[in-house]
Amino acid sequence: MNNKLSCLCLCLGSLMTASVTADTLIHAGKLFDGTGTSLRNNVTIVIEGNKIAEVKDGYAKAGNDDEVIDLKNSTVLPGLMDMHVHLSSQSGPGAYLERYTKNEADYALTAANYAKKTVHAGFTTVRNLGDIYNETVALRKAIDKGLLEGPRIYTAAKSIATTGGHADPSNGMARVIRPDTGPASGVVNGTAEAREAVRQRYQDGADVIKITATGGVLSVAKSGQNPQFMDDELQAIVETANDYDMTVAVHAHGKEGMKRAIKAGVTSIEHGTYMDEEAMDLMKQNNTYYVPTIMAGKFVAEKAKIDGYFPELVRPKAKEIGPLIQDTFKKAHNAGVNIAFGTDSGVSAHGDNAQEFGFMVEAGMSEADALLSATKHAAAMLKIDDQLGSVESGKLADIIAVNGNPIEDISVMESVTFVMKDGKVMKQK
């Protein structure tokens, strides 16, 4: 019996030894850890599995089984977070015909391609604010299982609109082919349908709720800023989302629809083009975040100059609204509104997300604060700052690196050289 026990103990000991995971040490020449505005020099980040175990001053000596990643000539940062993307599509002259030519699988494969571009650009977490067939729910699951390379996705699945509103998928169609839309397809009228649509998103596997509280630029509809939800509908959406612990993101250009949404208790305002002082004051009072998407505004304004790029109904809206967003951002930043980084990529090209940093700095935000908007503040808005948003002990190991110093030259963020997500290296030059 003693011999059998001895043999069993030896076998168990062997199994336990085999399961021990060696540490990964990142030697960082400079570290922007996401907790403040300054850089730390000559730092070691100790990673165990998918988490940061320790952040030490100096270059720690590696053990025999440890892996060392040499980033002594780089600036290391937390994985970046883009709070407004659309992974399933990208704008172009033929984009408005795609809903008639693409199937669910086409959108899913397109999204997989853009997801890889996004994570390789250093954005390890994104909030996907609207898709077509819930394809980003499937994409999130595939990425989480390790079947595909891509960022950590928090998806709204299909956006919620009112009839004829910015996210009504039947806009612009002849009556003979116009589908019968309702809460399942994200079109609501009245409080009962508003609640049903939120519950439908929950059933579909969405993580967050996205609504279009005003008209939009790229929808085939005349107004880009009219309010499109009543107060009771907005209240019903927010209350129901709160029951499911879901945050609410709000597309809004016009100030009246924006103010209604803020008063209802939404989490964030996207774009915010015609935001005025009253709206800014309401946002500060209600701790509402602003996600500016400056580069989307600049992109559509530029493309509106090209004949045939947008439908003629869209073109004047793009010319008028697009150029205004950067100035709105400047006013909101100066007023002290909470700002989280977001690009609306899918309007502009996926993978170019970091260009937004340059526009933010150009409008008067410091380089460090621009970086915090895509790390610490984005994580706080998503209510995941206990897991992500900074390089600290106990956080998930989402870590990127760039050559140069982004506090001195923010443009270096457009050339990410190293990406680690959840403790796994996804890009290393």
Image (cartoon, rainbow, N blue to C red):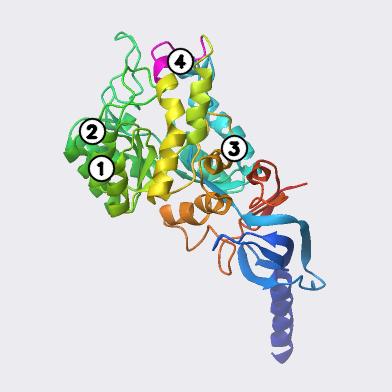
* Quadrant hosting residue 187: top left
- Which of the two labelled residues, at mark 4 and mark 3, occupies the earlier sequence position? 4
Few, some or many residues within 10 Å of mark 4 (<14, 14–19, 20+)? few
User: Residue 229 bears which disc, if any?
Assistant: 2
**Residue shown at the point (60%, 62%) measured from the top left:** 38
Dot 3: what SS?
helix
- Local SS, label 4: helix
Q: Secondary structure at mark 2?
A: loop
The residue wearing badge 1 is: 237
132 left or right of 192? Answer: right
Measure how far apart labels 4 and 3 are at the Cα level. 32 Å
User: Which mark is drawn over residue 100?
Assistant: 4
Residue that carries the numbered disc 3 in the rendered image: 355
Which numbered circle lies on residue 71?
none
Q: Residues within 10 Å of mark 1 (few under 14, many from 20)?
A: many
Q: Amino acid at mark 3?
A: Gln
- Mark 1 or 4, closer to the camera: 1
Instruction: Answer left or right for 72 relative to 77.
Output: right
The residue lying at 66 percent from left, 41 percent from top is 414
Residue 274 locus on image (x, y percent): 34, 33
Main SS, magenta region, reads loop
Q: Do the numbered discs 2 and 1 sit on residues whose CB atoms are within 8 Å? A: yes
Q: Position of residue 323 (x, y in %)?
A: 46, 27
Label 3 to label 2: alpha-carbon separation: 33 Å
Q: Real-space Cα distance between discs 4 and 2?
A: 28 Å
Discs 2/1, front = 2
Residue 334 seen by the camera: yes
Magenta span: 308-317
Residue 368 left/right relative to 256: right
The type of residue carrying mark 4 is Tyr
